[in-house]
Image: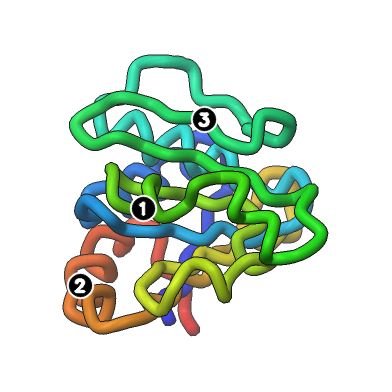
Amino acid sequence: MIACSTAAVDETRALGGAVAAVVDTGDVVVLVGDLGAGKTAFVQGFAATLGVTAPVTSPTFTLANRYEGRLVVNHLDVYRFDCPEEVNDLALPELLDDGVTLVEWGDTISSALGAEHLSVTIRFGAGDNDRSFELRGHGESWQRRTDRLSAALEPWASPC
């Protein structure tokens, strides 16, 4: 587990960008956190690092947004899903083969995401804009990248 913290929305975006620097096509990033914790801000920084120039917004009502950059960024929000079977409506297997997929509230459909993914848990901190992050790589691919990910996140590192 990698622990990080930020004190401003721009720092959360920058942290998302640092994670984007170590992703590959086919990767899945699961974002977990309360409403307003910073999941979309994280995705905004992530997408910007991958060359996305379009405005990145929450896909709460559209369920999925797709952005073109150096890699395709698929941004999903499954907050309104009642059960993992609803993921079939998203054509998830096709998305996973094309670009990088970030799933807000992805813990609710974890059984559909497979073993290979990075989970990012975001929690509110003491100050209005303070956030703490726990990043956990799941699967062999992420285990091989743990050192690279830790190095990329060093500016925001917190003691475990």
Horizontal arrangement in the rendering, residue 55 relative to residue 33 (left or right): left
The amino acid on which the numbered mark 2 sits, given as a three-letter code, is: Arg
Horizontal arrangement in the rendering, residue 102 relative to residue 64 (left or right): left
Give the residue furthest to the top. 54
Label 1: which residue? 96
Residue 119 at what x, y percent from top left?
49, 68
Neighbour tally class for label 2: few under 14, some 14-19, many 20 plus, Cα within 10 Å: some
Residue ID at (55%, 37%): 41
- Of callouts 1 and 3, the N-terminal one: 3
* Image quadrant where residue 105 sits: bottom right
Residue ID at (29%, 51%): 97
Q: Is mark 2 on a helix, strand or loop?
A: loop
**Picture quarter with the N terminus:** bottom left
* Image quadrant where residue 139 sits: bottom left
Task: Report how far apart the C-alphas of labels 1 and 2 lie in the structure.
Answer: 19 Å
Residue ID at (63%, 61%): 32
Label 2: which residue? 145
Q: What element carries label 3?
A: strand
Q: Which of marks 1 and 2 is in front?
A: 1
Residue 114 at what x, y percent from top left?
44, 74
Using the image, tell me which numbered label, if any, was put on residue 19: none
- Of callouts 1 and 2, the N-terminal one: 1
The amino acid on which the numbered mark 3 sits, given as a three-letter code, is: Asn
Residue 18 visible in rendering: no
Q: Which of 115 and 154 is in front in this view?
A: 115
Residue 144 at what x, y percent from top left?
17, 79
Q: What element carries label 1?
A: helix
Q: Which of 23 and 8 is in front in this view?
A: 23
Give the vertical position of 31 relative to 20 (above or below).
below
